């Protein structure tokens, strides 16, 4: 009778861990992409530009939010964590202050930019410090990839911000984005596109583009840690974000000369004074074409 009871106990416990997403044959592997505009306390270009007077302070906040996500992932049972520095020149996270349980991908250019390092071996993606897409009401430092060149980008008619586009990159490899932190509008847009199962950590509420009602960094970091753990422990409820091939990209630039330069690329067609369009059968090919057009536009 004891043997039967023990076997049943093991079975029940095993089923519990599988259902809560905490047991993985090869461990729980987590990818964390860290932007900067959506970090608590950040509201101005001086926070996010290397030459800004508040940049060194914002770097510490950004590193601490990355560490909070790492702590949450470890609490959920993560056995391997990759952090990709994803803002600007991608040398913002202070490597010596990052939790050594993770590895850091830093510097640019990188072939996959904000998603460098992602592949099919990961179980989940966490997006930290993300912001709303260009043209958002009360989106703190809102933009889409390049504030100097892009007004909007759509894939198959769906307008995407950086979080949603990066979720498509992850989805290409069958990996779900499970948690996103940032301002209230960034979180709302992400849930609207990726689904309400997405866990979000709203660390500030925009008051226009350059002001916010923000949590203090320590409180925001605690929230991120808790939400990361919750999201990873709910992994079985998460959805991979995909759109159906072929992939039509519609890019609306800020100026007509940017579209004029982009249409010189084979396969890219002018669709308006400031707009171009192109179609790819493979999403990653389309994503990399989009990134190439951004380089031309700059």
Image (spheres, rainbow, N blue to C red):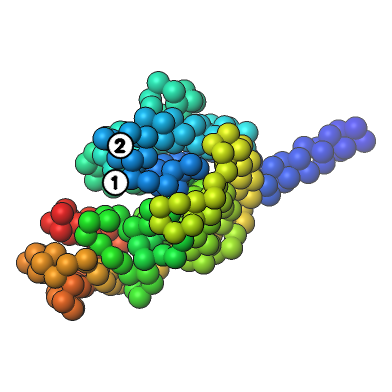
Q: Is residue 269 depicted above or below 35 in this figure?
A: below
Q: Secondary structure at mark 2?
A: loop
Q: Is residue 22 visible?
A: yes
Residue 60 x %, y %: 43, 30
Q: Residue at x 34, y 73 (%)?
A: 156
Q: The residue tagged with tag 1: helix, strand or loop?
A: helix
Q: Residue furthest right?
A: 1
Residue 260, located in which quarter of the rendered image? bottom left
The location of residue 275, given as percent across then percent down, is: 20, 73
The foreground one among 260 and 113 is 260
Against 9, is 167 above or below?
below
Are dots 2 and 1 in contact, CB under 8 Å? no
Among numbered discs 2 and 1, the one appearing first in the sequence: 2
Decide if residue 165 is on the left or right side of residue 206.
Answer: left
For discs 2 and 1, the disc positioned in front in the rendered view = 2
Which of the 4 image quarters holds residue 284?
bottom left
Q: Foreground: 202 or 167?
A: 202
Residue 210 percent location from the top left of the image: 40, 52
What is the x, y in percent for residue 255? Answer: 17, 67
Above or below, 182 relative to 48: below
Q: Nearer the viewer, residue 44 or 294?
A: 44
Q: Residue at x 61, y 42 (%)?
A: 223
Mark 2 Cα-neighbour bin, 10 Å: few <14, some 14–19, many ≥20: some
Q: Which quadrant is the N terminus positioned in? A: top right
Q: Which mark is residue 52?
A: 2
State which quarter of the image contains the C terminus.
Answer: bottom left
290 left or right, relative to 101: left
Residue positioned most to the bottom: 272
Q: Residue furthest left?
A: 264
Mark carried by residue 113? 1
Q: Residue at x 60, y 48 (%)?
A: 231
Left or right, 144 with respect to 24, comes to left
């Amino acid at each position: 009778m004891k043997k039967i009871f023990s076997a049943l106990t093991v079975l029940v416990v095993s089923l519990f861990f599988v259902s809560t997403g905490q047991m993985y044959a090869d461990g729980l592997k987590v990818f964390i992409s860290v932007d900067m505009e959506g970090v608590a306390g950040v509201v101005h270009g001086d926070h996010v530009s290397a030459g800004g007077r508040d940049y060194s302070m914002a770097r510490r906040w950004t590193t601490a939010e990355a560490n909070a996500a790492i702590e949450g992932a470890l609490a959920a049972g993560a056995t391997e964590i990759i952090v990709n520095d994803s803002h600007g020149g991608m040398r913002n996270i202070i490597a010596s202050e990052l939790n050594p349980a993770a590895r850091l991908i830093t510097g640019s250019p990188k072939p996959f930019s904000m998603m460098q390092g992602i592949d099919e071996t990961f179980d989940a993606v966490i997006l930290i410090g993300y912001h709303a897409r260009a043209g958002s009401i009360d989106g703190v430092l809102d933009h889409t990839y390049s504030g100097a060149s892009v007004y909007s980008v759509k894939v198959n008619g769906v307008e995407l911000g950086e979080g949603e586009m990066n979720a498509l990159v992850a989805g290409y490899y069958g990996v779900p984005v499970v948690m996103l932190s940032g301002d209230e509008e960034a979180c709302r847009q992400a849930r609207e596109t990726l689904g309400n199962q997405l866990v979000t950590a709203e660390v500030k509420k925009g008051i226009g583009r350059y002001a916010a009602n923000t949590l203090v960094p320590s409180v925001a970091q605690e929230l991120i840690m808790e939400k990361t753990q919750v999201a990873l422990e709910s992994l079985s409820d998460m959805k991979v974000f995909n759109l159906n091939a072929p992939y039509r990209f519609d890019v609306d630039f800020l100026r007509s000369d940017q579209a004029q330069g982009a249409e010189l690329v084979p396969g890219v067609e002018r669709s308006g004074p400031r707009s171009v369009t192109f179609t790819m059968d493979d999403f990653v090919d389309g994503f990399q074409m989009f990134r190439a057009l951004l380089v031309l536009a700059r």
